[in-house]
Image (cartoon, rainbow, N blue to C red):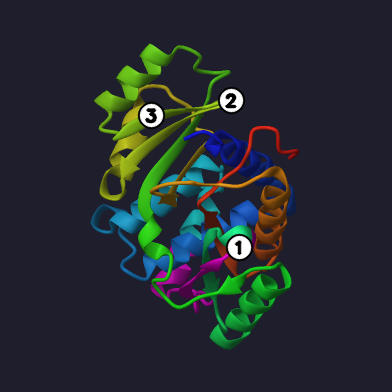
Amino acid sequence: MSGHSKWVNIRLRKGSQDAKRGKVFTKAAKEIILAAKGGGDPAANSRLRSAIAAAKAVNLPKDKIEAAIRKGTGQEAGGDLTEIMYEGHAPGGIAVIVETATDNRNRTVAEIRHIMGKGGGSMGETGCVGWMFDRKGVITLLKEKYPDEDTVTEAVLDAGAEDLSDEGDVWEVYTAMNDFSAVREALEAGGFEMEGAELQMVPKTLQAVDAETGAKVMRFVDALEECDDVQNVYTNADFPDDMDV
């Protein structure tokens, strides 16, 4: 997975920037609203359990979590959101998936198509690149807090995780989608503090890019993430280690 570390570190950096703008909280609340449409009881709604877990990992306040659930179940106004996933290509032919939450489909598709085209990419048909990704739970632990690989490996495997990956400054714990909440809760019970915990579209394989193309892909991703309707952007780019972030 050479180069994936670069993507992880970029995501962490961007996550910090987003937090300053309040976007992390907004995205977490939107995911809870969408999940709660399937029922407001986390015990009976695995997606809602996962959304709440991800929200807690970014320290979304309890009252905001509860408000988002009420919006999703229709008990409060503000829950009129539809989730739409767009697929296409970034510069260099890199596969890209864009997850959105919107109250206006026409506005969102027009904005995403415009951003993709302006950034040197293109929007494709549904399914054109989705098969290149799997949805998995991804839990991030800082190596600074947990430096011993054997200890971390034993803990995550005992918790029911699928895999542990060394990604430079962090450990990435991968879980099956349905096991995400259980693994997170087991690690939390074991005293682990998580830097991040969310469901992601994880590429099955990575496509190498040079530094110039990598920079274009990152600008492309940045532009998409600036759109208020965008929840997440995923690519299969394998960024070079010498790329300036």
Looking at marks 1 and 2 on the same chain, the residue that comes earlier in the sequence is marked by 1
Residue type at the position of mark 1: Ala
When the figure is inspected, residue 107 is found, relative to residue 198, above or below; the finding is: below
Q: Residue at x 44, y 24 (%)?
A: 192
Question: Whole-percent x and y of residue 77?
Answer: 52, 77
Residue stretch rendered in magenta on the structure: 68-91
Q: Residue at x 28, y 29 (%)?
A: 159
Q: Residue at x 52, y 55 (%)?
A: 234
Which residue position is annotated with label 3? 164
Residue type at the position of mark 3: Leu
Q: Is residue 19 left or right of residue 197?
A: right
Query: Element type at marker 2?
Result: loop
Query: Element type at marker 1?
Result: loop
Which residue position is annotated with label 1? 90
* Mark closer to the observer (1, 2): 1
Which residue position is annotated with label 2? 169
Image mark count: 3
Looking at marks 3 and 1 on the same chain, the residue that comes earlier in the sequence is marked by 1
Nearer to the camera, 232 or 50: 232
Q: Residue at x 36, y 62 (%)?
A: 131
Query: Which picture quadrant has residue 93?
Result: bottom right
